[in-house]
Amino acid sequence: MTETLAPEIDSSDPSSFPWSVFHDRHPVLVERVATEVPRPASQRAALDALLAETTTGTITAPDVDALRHEPWPWWRPEYRDLPWGETPFLWAESYFYRRVLDAVGYFVPGPWRGIDPFAPTKSRELAGAAVDAELAALDAEPGWDALVSSSLWGNRADLSFQAGPTAGHETGGLIADDSAQLHTLVHDRPAGEVHLIADNSGRELLPDLILIDHLLGAGLATGVVLHVKPHPYYVSDATAADVLAALTRLRAAPGRAAAVGERLTGLLRDGRLQLDAHEFFCGPLTYQALPTDLRQRFAGASLTISKGDLNYRRLVGDRHWATTASFAELTEHFPSPVAALRTLKCDVAVGLREETVNRLDATGKAWRLTGEYAVIHVRP
């Protein structure tokens, strides 16, 4: 009932953040995909046509006859021939990334099938010196609070976000902090199965994996299910291949990181760490619309940890909520206790105190968009 009170976010306003995603960020991303590997001219032409369509044209239907599997299940025929900005932002973004995969032949038989168009960008980040420094910090044997903080702020390492003009480099701190409730959920209850819905690969996935190692090694979880994307999405969103690449990076590192990588590899083999890659995670729906099989899986969790901006939007709804709207009420549909670890990189923000919002507004910054502020929200 609450959801009907707030309109869905779209990208029709040229002064809005969603408009800038399509007109400022996506051209950079398309250029990278087109040029970082020697693509055939047909793929470059398809990418250029997609960019022109999304910025100045109207929506066309997917070429379903060219696909080797079922058509995109979330295609909305009523959106055909509408300007992209007039459709819900969550739907339009998801459809854009699906169309990128179609443009580069990801799903069709041939030499480009299954090749991640964002792999060069992901690989550079994972091999970077910044990762070396972060893994070296493991030798200090950080405790629970430090591991949660690392997982939280790792969410700033969003490769699609870094391509945009709103990315900040400062850290403004937590503006909503339910970390005490999270500690209670994990430490003061019998251990159960914990689910973690991953966001980005590389520099965010690594601290997520290290947190999982701690949960299992300290007996705080009987098992962990790590939910990743079934195929490339939003540039750096984690897939199963990215998990394996992160484990390789850990095992090759010096010091304690290598031991963590070896343990996690063993945990995957014995089943205490499981990977899940449901097709729903590459769709434009909120978690209110969880399919039955996935809802039942989450219902068995003692805790679900949701990472990042996109998962946050899908938890509470991608709508123009009041910033003081209750996170607990907006997520009461979710079938298990849930904790959201998120740095703010889009318009959606709920669960904040009015005085906090007034203070942030007074700075004159676009504080919802820069990634400088973060929240830990918990609904027990």
Image (cartoon, rainbow, N blue to C red):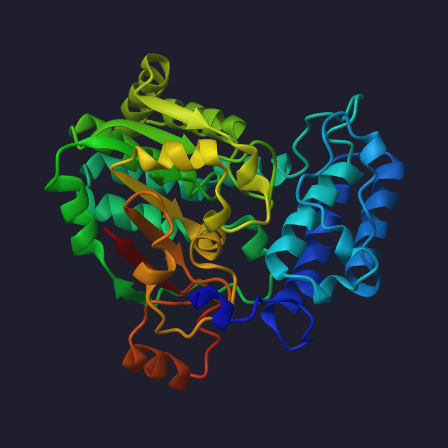
Q: Position of residue 186 (x, y in %)?
A: 18, 41
Q: Quadrant of residue 213?
A: top left
Residue with the most extreme front position: 1
Residue with the most extreme left position: 188
For the residue pair 291 and 123, the one nearer the viewer reads as 291
Q: Position of residue 203 (x, y in %)?
A: 43, 42
Q: Quadrant of residue 120?
A: top right
For the residue pair 44 and 346, the one nearer the viewer reads as 346
Is 147 positioned to the left or the right of 101 in the image? left
Q: Position of residue 7 (x, y in %)?
A: 55, 71
Residue 255 visible in image: no
Is 123 positioned to the left or the right of 136 in the image? right
Q: Is residue 316 above or below residue 271?
A: below
For the residue pair 193 and 329, the one nearer the viewer reads as 329
User: Which residue sits at x=18%, y=53%?
Assistant: 181
Quadrant position of the N terminus in the picture: bottom left
Q: Position of residue 183 (x, y in %)?
A: 16, 48
Residue 252 visible in image: yes
Q: Quadrant of residue 70?
A: top right
Q: Is residue 247 above or below residue 133?
A: above
How many numbered marks appear? 0
User: Which residue sits at x=18%, y=36%?
Assistant: 141
Is 189 positioned to the left or the right of 319 in the image? left
